[in-house]
Amino acid sequence: MDKFVWPVRVYYEDTDSGGVVYYANYLKFMERARTEWLRAHGFEQDALLRDQRLMFAVRSLSIDYQQPAHFNDLLAVVSRVVEARGATLVFEQTVERDPSAQVLCAARVRVACIDAQTFRARRIPRELLGERGGDVGDP
């Protein structure tokens, strides 16, 4: 699927005492980008929960930190869905310094679609996958 880019500015609260982004905050940036990806495709998480009893949960991730971001940097979180199968979405996400596109960290995030009442895996609705309605395959 096409890449989705979401901008983020590094605020003081995102950094440690040295002005460097605290490592766990990259995960927050990526989470927000996945939420904005859904929103850009016409889906709100609260509506999915209310109307379809559907939620998403991170099942696994791997992340590689390459360079630090600093206070007041403008970043871009780039997200691509590289696999959509059954109840699973796999995202490849990078946090890049904007506008140079220098990759600061890269992650592969496996997200499970789950039923909000049972917390069991649930097939991703076709409408959420767009016209593909099935596997995404390779990017």
Image (cartoon, rainbow, N blue to C red):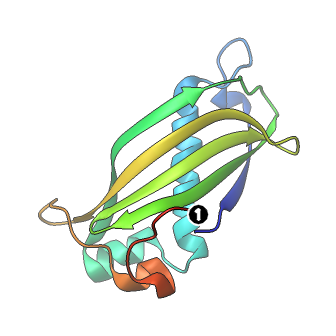
1 relative to 47, above or below: above
**Which element type, helix, strand or loop, lies under badge 1?**
helix
Asked whether, in this view, residue 50 is left or right of residue 62, the answer is left
Which residue type does callout 1 highlight?
Glu
Residue, disc 1: 36
Q: Quadrant of residue 74?
A: top right
Quarter the N terminus occupies: bottom right
Q: Position of residue 72 (x, y in %)?
A: 82, 33
- Quarter placement of the C terminus: bottom right
Please state if 7 lies on the left or on the right of 13 as rendered.
right
How far across and down, in percent of the image, does residue 134 sit? 37, 78
Residue situated furthest right in the rendering: 99
Residue 118, image x, y percentages: 11, 63
> In the rendering, at what x and y percent does residue 80 appear?
57, 58
Q: Is residue 113 left or right of residue 7?
A: left
Q: Residue at x 21, y 66 (%)?
A: 116
